[in-house]
Structures are given as structure tokens and as C-alpha cells.
Amino acid sequence: MGINVLMRYVQDRHGSVVDGHAVSMMRALARAIWVELGIGGAAPTTWKQVDAQSRDSYYHAMNVGFFELRLCNENWKAEQIATVYYLSWYNKWLDYLQTRSLALPVAVNPLPKAGPSELRKKAAPSKRKKAKVSPTVSFTGLILKRTYIYVG
């Protein structure tokens, strides 16, 4: 994992190829961004079909996260990462969605129709027990976080 063999085009300002750990982190950030697209229902079948706003957000996040990706014209390094890895991620995302839909029963409007204060009262657990980790990952700037849900 320490040796970069596939993304040798990602180099630092001195022209040295970055190591495998750095490219693993780049791919992880790219996947987190794509998960956000998937959660929002905006994940296209192929990277070439992505809308301009999502593409620009992806470029921005990748450039902020990794200085080495800024060392090129027209974001071609970040684009290359997406071109090579997106389809594989998308196919796994489809499998994940299919598995989740088969495993979970379909709920018909689980929240009652009420105002925000009534929802808070009904949704607030009377006694907190154990925290469970939600399967969703949120991408905010460069902070990846897990969401904890307390069940009563």
C-alpha cells in the first residue's frame, strides 16, 4: 500500500511521485464525495454524465484536500481519478442500494404529520441507551464524520 503504482501522474511540486498512502487518501475522499452524490440521488451512471455543479464541487474538494492535485491545468489529475475509479464505485453503490432495499422493510411515512415541536417531542427518546453508528457518511468540507443515533 505504500507504493504508488497506478497513479504515478500525481506528483509533488518537485516532480516526485506521491506515495501509495497519499493516493489511497485521495481515492477515499473521492468515494466520500461520490457517496454524497449517491445519497442526494445525483450519482450518474458514468462520470462523463455528472452535472457541472457536482463536477466543480468534486474538483474543489479534491484540490483543497490535496495540494498535488492543484499542480496541473484544468483539474486533469482529479478528472483522471474520477474517470478511472468512478465506475467501479458506482457499481458497488448499486449493489449496496440493492442489498439495503432487500434487507430493510419499506416504511410508509414513518414520521407523523406534525409541526417541528411535536416531532421533537415524539422523536426524543425518554432514556438513552446505546449509540448505534448510522451507515451514512457525511462529507462537509474535508471533514468525514459518522452520524450517531441514540435508540431508546
Image (cartoon, rainbow, N blue to C red):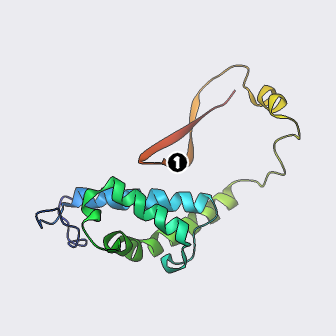
| Residue lying farthest to the right in this orientation | 113
Q: Is residue 25 above or below residue 119?
A: below
Residue situated in front as seen by the camera: 135 or 17: 17
Residue situated in front as seen by the camera: 88 or 64: 64
Determine which quarter of the picture holds residue 21.
bottom left
* Element at label 1: strand
Determine which quarter of the picture holds residue 101.
bottom right
Q: Position of residue 9 (x, y in %)?
A: 22, 73
Quadrant of the frame with the N terminus? bottom left
Query: Callout 1 environment at 10 Å: few (<14), some (14 to 19), or many (20+)?
Result: some
Q: Residue at x 69, y 61 (%)?
A: 102
Tell me the kind of residue under disc 1.
Ser
| Residue lying farthest to the top in this orientation | 127
Quadrant of the frame with the C terminus? top right
Q: Is residue 61 above or below residue 150?
A: below
Read off the residue under disc 1. 138
Q: Is residue 105 visible?
A: yes
